[in-house]
Image: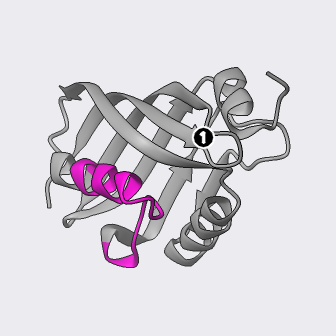
Amino acid sequence: MTPRDLYEHMRRRWLSNDTAFDPDMLTEDVVIETPFALPGRPTRTAGRDAVLAYVRAGHASLPFRFDDCRTLAVHETADPRTIVVEYELHATMTATGEKDSAPFIAVLTARDGRIARWREYQNPIAVGHATGALPG
């Protein structure tokens, strides 16, 4: 799969309210980075098994369901294995029905048709409000 194909696969998984990744999407040595993660959350997770465990645990604790993933832009880079994606995730809080959204920018690097690196930049305040980690 191309980097765009992999991103679209992730997008479909979000919208089906599944984890972002399945094992077949990831290289064995995949690295997931979230440099602006909320305090207490990892900024780097390495290795397929560790990444899958992390996203499964995070998904199980989500207080919302995804309603939409709006792709704002996909930027090609000098490296054909890497794209930069601007997107917004829209969700409904399952307990209250309140709707919220948060913007993201991610750098996706593929190798042999799988994700080798996913570096996601997020607004920790917006994410914290949306997840209930910060008061509204």
Q: Secondary structure at mark 1?
A: loop
Residue 7 appears left or right of 46: left
* Residue plotted at (51% across, 38% down): 91
Residue 136 appears left or right of 107: right
* Location of residue 52 in the rendering, given as x and y in whole percent from the top left corner: 54, 71
* Location of residue 65 in the rendering, given as x and y in whole percent from the top left corner: 53, 50
For label 1, the residue is 34
* Location of residue 46 in the rendering, given as x and y in whole percent from the top left corner: 58, 63
Residue 90 appears left or right of 115: right
* Location of residue 56 in the rendering, given as x and y in whole percent from the top left corner: 59, 69
Judge whether 94 appears above or below 129 on screen. Answer: below
The answer to which quarter of the image holds residue 35 is top right
Q: How is the image coloured?
A: one colour
Classified by dominant secondary structure, the portion drawn in magenta counts as helix
* Residue plotted at (71% across, 60% down): 61
Please check the rendered image and state whether residue 11 is part of the magenta-colored stretch, yes or no: yes
Judge whether 11 appears above or below 85 on screen. Answer: below
Q: Which residues are magenta?
A: 7-24
Look at the image and tell me in which quarter the N terminus lies: bottom left
| Mark 1 crowd level (few <14, some 14–19, many ≥20, 10 Å Cα) | some
**Which one is in front, 25 or 15?**
15
